[in-house]
């Protein structure tokens, strides 16, 4: 199946990133109980709750914010920043000693994922090949599930042979590979799928889509004159 470059790179970044986290998820409760001072089943539950609650609280506001700006540069900024933040978290687990370390890392993981997922889905939706919507979403889901499943098998093997630290380092490295793949799309984000784009400085300066429309109309008017 032929797919465009942007969709292909988004899927590849997804595979790299979530395969990395697939090495962590199965062993994470064991790591907390065995290696964290004061680590208990309750700590595992609180850590999981922090991630899901923080991510849930941030996802919709971030998505709403991204919708207020034209083009894909804002989506790209949140995507690559979010993936980078989340990819650094496994390296933080290497140095974690107490429950509050885990809680703090889970908080940053949630922030990163709320940013990344909102940006990823926005770019994927804008660039999906017409007539292949279901197949391309399904392809991403299938490859993501396969990568995560295979990683789950290797997670136990890696802990037995290289310890938790080895698993965290490999997971973080795979995450950063996903960030690099996304970075390769930076030039593709110059033009919005909607024909309008706002640069990153416009985003921070608060120029919204309506102003972008007005600016483009002014430019068109000047050219006609």
Image (cartoon, rainbow, N blue to C red):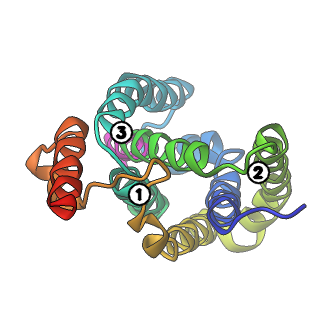
Residues under numbered marks 1 and 2 in contact, where contact means CB atoms less than 8 Å apart: no
Q: Earlier in the sequence, mark 3 or mark 1?
A: 1
Q: Nearer the viewer, residue 100 or 225?
A: 225
Q: Main secondary structure of the magenta part?
A: helix
Q: Is residue 48 left or right of residue 74?
A: right
Q: Spot the residue most to the left.
A: 205
Mark 2 Cα shell of 10 Å, populated few (<14), some (14-19), many (≥20): many
Numbered badge on residue 136: none
Q: Is residue 17 left or right of residue 201?
A: right
Which one is in front in this view, the residue at disc 2 or the one at disc 3? 2
**Dot 2 corresponds to which residue?**
144
**Dot 1 corresponds to which residue?**
76
Q: Secondary structure at mark 1?
A: helix
Q: Earlier in the sequence, mark 2 or mark 3?
A: 3
Residue at (84%, 50%) from the top-left corner? 149
Which one is in front in this view, the residue at disc 3 or the one at disc 1? 1
Numbered badge on residue 107: 3
Position of the C terminus by quadrant: bottom left
Give residue 154's position: percent from left, percent from top.
82, 62
């Amino acid at each position: 199946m032929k797919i465009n470059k942007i969709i292909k790179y988004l899927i590849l970044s997804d595979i790299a990133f979530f395969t990395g986290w697939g090495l962590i998820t199965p062993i994470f409760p064991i790591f907390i109980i065995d290696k964290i001072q004061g680590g208990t089943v309750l700590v595992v539950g609180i850590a999981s709750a922090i991630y899901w609650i923080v991510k849930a609280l941030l996802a919709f506001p971030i998505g709403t914010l991204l919708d207020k700006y034209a083009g894909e540069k804002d989506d790209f900024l949140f995507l690559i920043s979010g993936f980078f933040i989340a990819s650094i978290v496994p390296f933080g687990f290497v140095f974690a000693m107490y429950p509050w370390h885990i809680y703090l890392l889970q908080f940053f993981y949630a922030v990163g994922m709320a940013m990344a997922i909102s940006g990823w889905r926005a770019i994927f939706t804008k660039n999906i090949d017409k007539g292949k919507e279901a197949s391309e979403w399904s392809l991403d889901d299938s490859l993501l599930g396969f990568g995560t499943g295979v990683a789950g098998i290797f997670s136990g093997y890696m802990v037995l042979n290289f310890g938790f630290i080895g698993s965290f380092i490999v997971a973080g490295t795979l995450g950063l590979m996903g960030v690099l793949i996304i970075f390769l799309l930076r030039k593709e984000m110059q033009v919005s799928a909607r024909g309008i784009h706002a640069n990153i400085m416009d985003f921070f300066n608060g120029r919204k889509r309506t102003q972008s429309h007005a600016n483009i109309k002014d430019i068109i008017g000047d050219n006609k004159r």
